[in-house]
Amino acid sequence: MKSNEVANLLMKRLDKRQGKDLLAYDISSASIGADVMIIATGRNSRHANTLADEIEELAKDSGLTLASREGRAAGGWILLDFGSIIVHIMDPQSRDYYALERLWKEYPSLDAVSAY
């Protein structure tokens, strides 16, 4: 399965599990290994952990291998690195503070194209 297709599956799962402010960017021109970056917000640390666990399971079922899991929901930010897809799950305060979408806004937004 292509990165964009798996990213769409991950976005659908995040949406189904009530992840908020979902964004996906095509970062292939800026990254050596990653093609897609997904950003999501969980309601609180427990919700963020649940979202991260669900995404790990779905990605594994889709043939991706988790290269790294960094951070903790209690710290406000979980990063899941699957090589070709990177997923950031943040609490609302961290999402507002770090505003990753401002850093990546020049890259094509996948959610607008595919409407997961």
Image (cartoon, rainbow, N blue to C red):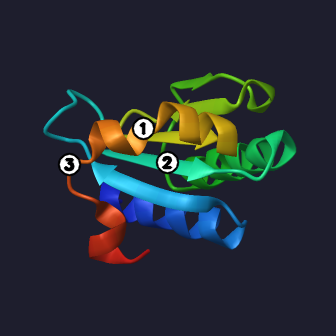
Q: Quadrant of the N terminus?
A: bottom left
For the point 26% across and 30% down, the residue is: 33
The residue at which mark 2 appears reads as: 39
Residue 98 makes an appearance in the image = yes
Nearest the camera: 98 or 17?
A: 98
Q: Which mark is residue 51?
A: none
The numbered mark, 1 or 3, whose residue comes first in the sequence reads: 1
Q: Residue 107 carries which label?
A: 3
Residue 35 makes an appearance in the image = no
In the image: residue 75, left or right of residue 40: right
The numbered mark, 2 or 1, whose residue comes first in the sequence reads: 2
Q: Which secondary structure, mark 2?
A: strand
Q: Nearer the viewer, mark 2 or mark 1?
A: 1
Up/down of 4 relative to 36, above or below: below
Q: Quadrant of residue 69?
A: top right
Label 3 Cα crowd, 10 Å radius (few <14 / some 14-19 / many 20+): some
Q: State if disc 2 and disc 3 touch (CB < 8 Å).
A: no
Residue 25: % across, % down: 31, 51
Q: State if disc 1 and disc 2 touch (CB < 8 Å).
A: yes
Residue 35: % across, % down: 27, 43
Q: Residue 100 carries which label?
A: 1
For the point 72% across and 66% down, the residue is: 17
Nearest the camera: 110 or 54?
A: 110
Residue 28: % across, % down: 19, 41
Q: State if disc 3 and disc 1 touch (CB < 8 Å).
A: no
The numbered mark, 3 or 2, whose residue comes first in the sequence reads: 2
Residue kind at label 1, given as amino acid type = Leu
Up/down of 1 relative to 86, above or below: below
What is the CA distance from the residue labelled 3 to the residue labelled 2?
A: 13 Å
In the image: residue 114, left or right of residue 55: left
